[in-house]
Structure formats: structure tokens, C-alpha cells
Image: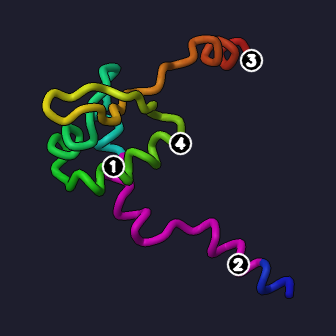
Amino acid sequence: LEKMDAANEARKNKPSKTAIENAPVIAALTDALTSDPQTAADLAATVGISTQKASSLLRQIVANGAAIVTDIKVPKKGTCKGYSLAPVDEDAGEDVAEG
């Protein structure tokens, strides 16, 4: 039972093949983010991937706290999700510097 638990824990901590392939794309999307909200379609065109893949990866970036989602109005499309960089907490940086 201990060996099974150890094997399951090792498998859980190992990134999947897809996660390894998506890592550079996630980094490119994060680099493309600005303080102004952009749609997933705009970011997908910038990085060179499909809108669906960009949307999925952007949800992961938001879950990790590197980006935020806001509703933006797009002419002739209506309201869409806009992704932008998460604001940097300046107080957290000062605590690290002092400690």
C-alpha cells in the first residue's frame, strides 16, 4: 500500500506531456498581456494559436493569479472577456525586501 501511495504521489507531481508542450505557449501569452484588457482572439493572433487554445490557457493563467478577467465591449460583437495582467502588490515586494 505504501508503494502504491508513493507511485501515485510521484505521478501526481509529474507534469503531463500536454502541460510540458503548453509551457512555452503559456509563457508567450503571459508576455503578450498588458495592463489594457485584450480578448482571447487578439492574444491568440499575437501568439499564433487558435482562439480556443488561447482561451483555455488564459483560464489557467488567471487561475494561477498572473492575469485578471474583465468584461469589455467589442464593437459588433457585444461584451467579451478581456484578459490583462494582474496588478502587482507593492506591499508584498517590500515585505520580502525587509525580511
Magenta part, dominant SS = helix
Q: Which residue is mark 4?
A: 64
Front residue (pair 49, 10)? 49
The residues bearing labels 3 and 1 have C-alpha atoms spaced at a distance of 38 Å
Q: Earlier in the sequence, mark 4 or mark 3?
A: 4
Nearest-to-viewer mark from 4 and 3:
4
Q: Position of residue 17 (x, y in %)?
A: 42, 72
SS at mark 2 in the image: helix
Q: Earlier in the sequence, mark 3 or mark 1?
A: 1
The numbered disc on residue 8 is 2
Q: Is residue 62 left or right of residue 50?
A: right
The residues bearing labels 2 and 1 have C-alpha atoms spaced at a distance of 30 Å
Q: Residues within 10 Å of mark 3 (few under 14, many from 20)?
A: few
The residues bearing labels 4 and 2 have C-alpha atoms spaced at a distance of 24 Å
- Quadrant for the C terminus in the image: top right
Q: Earlier in the sequence, mark 4 or mark 1?
A: 1
Tell me if residue 52 comes above or below residue 98 in the rendering: below
Q: Which residue is mark 1?
A: 55
Tell me if residue 49 comes above or below residue 77 in the rendering: below
SS at mark 3 in the image: loop
The residues bearing labels 4 and 3 have C-alpha atoms spaced at a distance of 24 Å
Image: magenta residue range: 6-26
Tell me if residue 90 comes above or below residue 53 in the rendering: above
- Quadrant for the N terminus in the image: bottom right
Q: Which residue is mark 3?
A: 99
